[in-house]
Image (spheres, rainbow, N blue to C red):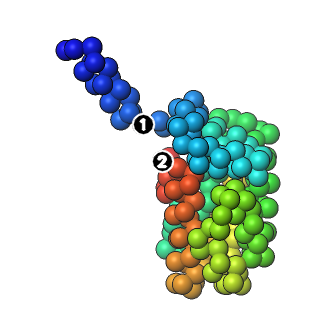
Amino acid sequence: MRPTALLMFLLGLLACRPAGHDAAARRSAAARDSAFAAVQSRGEAAMGVDQYTSTHVFEPLPDGGRIVLERDTADSVGTARIREHMEQIARQFAAGDFHLPGLVHARAVPGTDVMSAERGRITYTVESLPRGGAVRVRSADPRVVGAIHRFLAFQREEHHAPAHQSR
Protein backbone atom coordinates (compact mmCIF):
# COMPACT_ATOMS: atom_id res chain seq x y z
CA MET A 1 0.00 0.00 0.00
CA ARG A 2 1.37 3.44 -0.90
CA PRO A 3 2.25 5.75 2.02
CA THR A 4 -0.42 8.29 1.05
CA ALA A 5 -3.11 5.61 0.78
CA LEU A 6 -2.02 4.12 4.12
CA LEU A 7 -2.19 7.55 5.77
CA MET A 8 -5.68 8.17 4.37
CA PHE A 9 -6.81 4.73 5.56
CA LEU A 10 -5.50 5.35 9.09
CA LEU A 11 -7.06 8.82 9.23
CA GLY A 12 -10.36 7.31 8.11
CA LEU A 13 -10.20 4.75 10.91
CA LEU A 14 -9.51 7.47 13.47
CA ALA A 15 -12.41 9.56 12.19
CA CYS A 16 -14.80 6.63 12.63
CA ARG A 17 -13.63 5.93 16.18
CA PRO A 18 -16.22 7.15 18.73
CA ALA A 19 -14.90 9.72 21.20
CA GLY A 20 -16.89 8.24 24.12
CA HIS A 21 -16.37 10.03 27.41
CA ASP A 22 -12.71 10.81 26.74
CA ALA A 23 -12.18 14.45 27.76
CA ALA A 24 -9.11 14.86 25.53
CA ALA A 25 -11.06 13.65 22.51
CA ARG A 26 -13.92 16.02 23.33
CA ARG A 27 -11.53 18.96 23.70
CA SER A 28 -9.89 18.08 20.39
CA ALA A 29 -13.26 17.90 18.65
CA ALA A 30 -14.23 21.23 20.18
CA ALA A 31 -11.06 22.84 18.93
CA ARG A 32 -12.24 21.96 15.41
CA ASP A 33 -15.74 23.29 16.13
CA SER A 34 -15.50 26.83 17.46
CA ALA A 35 -19.26 27.16 18.06
CA PHE A 36 -19.23 24.04 20.25
CA ALA A 37 -16.13 25.26 22.08
CA ALA A 38 -17.89 28.55 22.80
CA VAL A 39 -20.96 26.73 24.18
CA GLN A 40 -18.68 24.59 26.35
CA SER A 41 -16.87 27.67 27.66
CA ARG A 42 -20.06 29.58 28.44
CA GLY A 43 -21.55 26.41 29.95
CA GLU A 44 -18.62 26.03 32.30
CA ALA A 45 -18.98 29.67 33.38
CA ALA A 46 -22.73 29.25 33.97
CA MET A 47 -22.66 25.82 35.61
CA GLY A 48 -19.37 25.95 37.45
CA VAL A 49 -18.02 22.64 36.17
CA ASP A 50 -15.76 21.61 33.29
CA GLN A 51 -18.07 20.65 30.45
CA TYR A 52 -15.48 18.33 28.90
CA THR A 53 -15.29 16.16 32.02
CA SER A 54 -19.04 16.14 32.61
CA THR A 55 -21.82 14.40 30.73
CA HIS A 56 -25.15 15.92 29.75
CA VAL A 57 -28.21 13.90 28.79
CA PHE A 58 -31.39 15.51 27.46
CA GLU A 59 -34.03 12.80 27.56
CA PRO A 60 -37.44 13.32 25.96
CA LEU A 61 -40.22 11.45 27.78
CA PRO A 62 -43.94 11.12 26.98
CA ASP A 63 -44.88 13.72 29.63
CA GLY A 64 -41.88 16.03 29.17
CA GLY A 65 -38.31 15.03 29.78
CA ARG A 66 -35.23 14.91 31.92
CA ILE A 67 -32.07 17.03 32.00
CA VAL A 68 -29.09 15.17 33.45
CA LEU A 69 -25.63 16.50 34.29
CA GLU A 70 -22.99 14.35 35.97
CA ARG A 71 -19.25 14.43 36.47
CA ASP A 72 -17.48 11.66 34.56
CA THR A 73 -15.44 10.67 37.62
CA ALA A 74 -15.85 11.02 41.37
CA ASP A 75 -15.58 14.73 42.25
CA SER A 76 -17.38 15.85 45.40
CA VAL A 77 -16.93 19.57 44.71
CA GLY A 78 -18.12 19.24 41.08
CA THR A 79 -21.02 17.03 42.14
CA ALA A 80 -22.14 19.59 44.72
CA ARG A 81 -21.87 22.39 42.16
CA ILE A 82 -23.99 20.42 39.66
CA ARG A 83 -26.67 19.80 42.28
CA GLU A 84 -26.74 23.53 43.10
CA HIS A 85 -27.03 24.32 39.39
CA MET A 86 -29.93 21.89 38.96
CA GLU A 87 -31.76 23.49 41.90
CA GLN A 88 -31.11 26.92 40.37
CA ILE A 89 -32.43 26.05 36.92
CA ALA A 90 -35.48 24.27 38.34
CA ARG A 91 -36.38 27.45 40.29
CA GLN A 92 -35.67 29.75 37.35
CA PHE A 93 -37.54 27.62 34.82
CA ALA A 94 -40.54 27.26 37.15
CA ALA A 95 -40.64 31.08 37.28
CA GLY A 96 -40.54 31.25 33.47
CA ASP A 97 -36.93 32.51 33.48
CA PHE A 98 -34.85 30.92 30.71
CA HIS A 99 -32.09 33.52 30.53
CA LEU A 100 -29.37 31.04 31.54
CA PRO A 101 -29.82 28.71 28.53
CA GLY A 102 -29.95 31.83 26.35
CA LEU A 103 -26.61 32.97 27.78
CA VAL A 104 -24.97 29.55 27.37
CA HIS A 105 -26.12 29.27 23.75
CA ALA A 106 -25.88 33.01 22.95
CA ARG A 107 -29.34 32.97 21.37
CA ALA A 108 -32.98 32.21 22.01
CA VAL A 109 -33.50 28.54 22.80
CA PRO A 110 -36.37 26.80 20.98
CA GLY A 111 -39.34 25.88 23.15
CA THR A 112 -38.59 28.36 25.92
CA ASP A 113 -41.17 30.86 24.70
CA VAL A 114 -43.97 28.34 25.27
CA MET A 115 -42.36 26.96 28.43
CA SER A 116 -42.21 30.47 29.88
CA ALA A 117 -45.74 31.43 28.86
CA GLU A 118 -47.17 28.12 30.12
CA ARG A 119 -44.99 27.83 33.23
CA GLY A 120 -48.03 27.03 35.38
CA ARG A 121 -48.57 23.85 33.35
CA ILE A 122 -45.07 22.49 34.02
CA THR A 123 -43.52 20.92 37.11
CA TYR A 124 -39.78 20.68 37.75
CA THR A 125 -38.40 18.09 40.17
CA VAL A 126 -34.72 17.96 41.09
CA GLU A 127 -33.10 14.55 41.53
CA SER A 128 -29.69 13.84 43.10
CA LEU A 129 -27.54 11.40 41.16
CA PRO A 130 -24.28 9.74 42.30
CA ARG A 131 -22.06 12.26 40.46
CA GLY A 132 -24.49 15.11 39.83
CA GLY A 133 -28.15 15.73 39.38
CA ALA A 134 -31.15 15.86 37.12
CA VAL A 135 -34.26 17.94 36.59
CA ARG A 136 -37.41 16.05 35.66
CA VAL A 137 -39.74 18.25 33.59
CA ARG A 138 -43.44 17.27 33.35
CA SER A 139 -46.60 18.58 31.75
CA ALA A 140 -50.00 17.11 30.90
CA ASP A 141 -50.47 19.60 28.03
CA PRO A 142 -49.39 18.13 24.66
CA ARG A 143 -48.48 21.56 23.29
CA VAL A 144 -46.20 22.19 26.28
CA VAL A 145 -44.68 18.71 26.00
CA GLY A 146 -43.87 19.54 22.37
CA ALA A 147 -42.09 22.71 23.50
CA ILE A 148 -40.15 20.74 26.13
CA HIS A 149 -39.12 18.26 23.43
CA ARG A 150 -37.93 21.11 21.16
CA PHE A 151 -35.93 22.55 24.07
CA LEU A 152 -34.32 19.17 24.81
CA ALA A 153 -33.56 18.44 21.14
CA PHE A 154 -31.82 21.80 20.78
CA GLN A 155 -29.80 21.18 23.94
CA ARG A 156 -28.80 17.69 22.76
CA GLU A 157 -27.54 19.07 19.48
CA GLU A 158 -25.71 22.04 20.96
CA HIS A 159 -24.03 20.01 23.73
CA HIS A 160 -23.34 17.00 21.46
CA ALA A 161 -25.20 14.97 24.08
CA PRO A 162 -27.24 11.76 24.01
CA ALA A 163 -31.00 11.48 24.45
CA HIS A 164 -30.75 8.60 26.90
CA GLN A 165 -28.27 7.46 29.52
CA SER A 166 -26.07 4.55 28.49
CA ARG A 167 -26.10 2.93 31.92
Say left or right for 7 vs 26. Answer: left
The mark nearer the N terminus, 2 or 1, is 1
Question: Residue 143: which quarter of the image?
Answer: bottom right
- Looking at the image, the residue that sits furthest to the front is 4
Q: Residues within 10 Å of mark 1 (few under 14, many from 20)?
A: few
Report which quarter residue 66 is drawn in.
Answer: bottom right
Residue sitting nearer the eye, 137 or 151: 151
Say which residue label 1 marks. Answer: 18
Q: Quadrant of the N terminus?
A: top left
Residue 41 drawn at (x, y percent): 69, 44
**Up-down: is 24 above or below 152?**
above
Question: Is residue 26 among what the camera can see?
Answer: no
Q: Position of residue 62 (x, y in %)?
A: 49, 74
Q: Position of residue 87 (x, y in %)?
A: 78, 61
C-alpha span from label 2 to label 1: 14 Å
Q: Any mark on residue 166, and which?
A: 2
Label 1 near label 2: C-beta < 8 Å? no
x 71%, y 49%: residue: 42
* Residue 30 in sight: yes
Q: Which mark is residue 153?
A: none
- Mark 1, secondary structure of its residue: loop
Q: Amino acid at mark 1?
A: Pro
Name the residue at 76% across, 52% down. 46
Residue at x 62% of width, y 43% of height:
37
Q: How many marks?
A: 2
Give amino acid for label 2. Answer: Ser
Query: Label 2 neighbourhood size at 10 Å, few (<14), some (14-19), many (20+)?
Result: few
* Secondary structure of residue under mark 2: loop
Which numbered mark, 2 or 1, is in the foreground of this view?
1
Q: Name the one closer to the observer, 4 or 53.
A: 4
Q: Is residue 108 above or below residue 44?
A: below
